[in-house]
Amino acid sequence: MSPKGREFKAAVADYVVEYRVPKLGDKKLRVSMVLFPRDKRKIDIDNRIKCVLDALQDAGVFDDDFQVDELSIVRGKPIKGGAIRVLIEEIETSDSSESSPSEDS
C-alpha cells in the first residue's frame, strides 16, 4: 500500500474514534457516497469506492465490506483539498428488494 493509502486509512480510523462512529457488526448495509474532487481534473469515481470501504472495515465500522448490499456514489463539486461524505444505513431484513428477478427478465 502506498504511503498516501496508509495515511488515508489512518485518517479514517482517527475520524471513527473522534466522532464515535457506531459499530455496525455484521448487519446488511446501504452505503451512499458523495465524492468532492480536489480540482476539476478528470477522475474515475468508481476507483474511490474500494479504498473507502476497506478503510471503514479496517476502522471497525463493519465486519466485512461483503455486507454492503446497496451502494451509490455521486460526484459533487470540487472543493479545496477534496473530500468524501459517506452515509451508512442498516438495511432492514424485511426489505422487498431481497427478492430475485423473474426468469422472464
Image: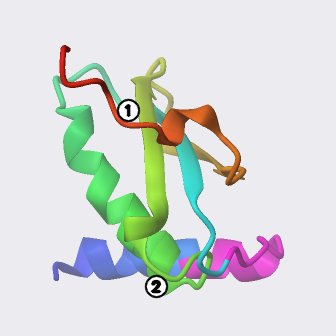
Residue at 77% x, 71% y is 21
Local secondary structure at mark 2: helix
- Residue type indicated by callout 1: Pro
Frontmost residue, 94 versus 21: 94
Mark 2 packing: few (<14 Cα in 10 Å), some, or many (20+)?
Answer: some
Q: What residue sits right under mark 1 in the picture?
A: 37
Image depth: mark 1 or mark 2 in front: 2
Mark closer to the chain start, 1 or 2: 1
Mark 1 packing: few (<14 Cα in 10 Å), some, or many (20+)?
Answer: many
Task: Residue 23: give x, y in percent of width and height.
Answer: 72, 78
- State which quarter of the image contains the N terminus: bottom left
Q: Magenta span has 80?
A: no
The number of numbered discs placed on residues in the rendered structure image is 2
Residue at 46% x, 57% y is 68
Q: Is residue 81 visible?
A: no
Q: Is residue 95 visible?
A: yes
Local secondary structure at mark 1: loop
Report the span colored magenta. Answer: 13-24
* Residue 58, disc: 2
Residue at 53% x, 74% y is 11
Give the alpha-carbon distance from disc 1 to disc 2, as whole Å. 23 Å
